[in-house]
Image: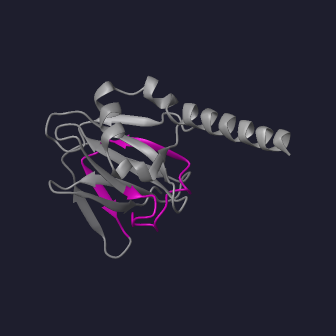
Amino acid sequence: MIRLLTFALTTFLLFNFSQAQDSTEYNKHIPEWASKVLESDNLFQSYEIIDSINPFYFEADFTGDEKIDIAFIVKSKLSGDVGTYIINGGKNVSFVMGAGKPIGMGNSIDWCDNWFVYRKKYIYNFTATKKKFIIQNPALEFRKTDERSIVVYWDKRRYKSAILNVK
């Protein structure tokens, strides 16, 4: 009985130790200021970074404040939904879109095949009415092959999303 308990405890500790090491592996590759925000942010405790996607983060001035912001693909620990976690570098404030929160095409971007920094100055959105949004800063585009995609952009107050017709 003691051998069985010892084996179970050892297995449990080894598994959890290896999981903890893997979850912080990304810290070696991100800017130090972003790592500090992740460590201290209560919001981030509900998410885990998906670092198997290449690249697993983007840096750009998404808010137009002349400070570098950083975006990650994350997975909600509660629901398993996938989304983006953005840290505004000027104020070290974080935002989540998707990962259980509405993003324009549901609450998850688990359908996303790839993502990019969107640098065009406009977004054509043909979902409800034909609209052309003008955006001032780089944004994030989450794309499923050559179908529709979502662009997440800063509108001077908060992050918003718009569906972009790729074709």
Indicate whether 134 appears above or below 21.
Answer: below
Indicate whether 137 appears above or below 58.
Answer: below
In-image side of 110 versus 14 (left or right):
left
Residue 145 locus on image (x, y percent):
56, 51
Indicate whether 24 appears above or below 139.
Answer: above
Residue 2 locus on image (x, y percent):
82, 41
Residue 28 locus on image (x, y percent):
45, 23
Q: What residue is at 35 percent from the left and 39 percent from the top?
A: 38
**Bounds of the magenta span?**
97-126
**Dominant secondary structure of the magenta stretch?**
loop
Instruction: Tell me, yes or no, if residue 70 can be seen here.
Output: no
Q: In the orientation shown, which residue stands out farthest toward the front?
A: 2
Indicate whether 29 appears above or below 12.
Answer: above
State the scheme by which the image is colored: one colour
Quarter occupied by residue 66? top left
Q: What residue is at 46 percent from the left and 66 percent from the top?
A: 107
Magenta stretch containing residue 32, yes or no? no
Instruction: Tell me, yes or no, if residue 35 can be seen here.
Output: yes
Quarter occupied by residue 34? top left
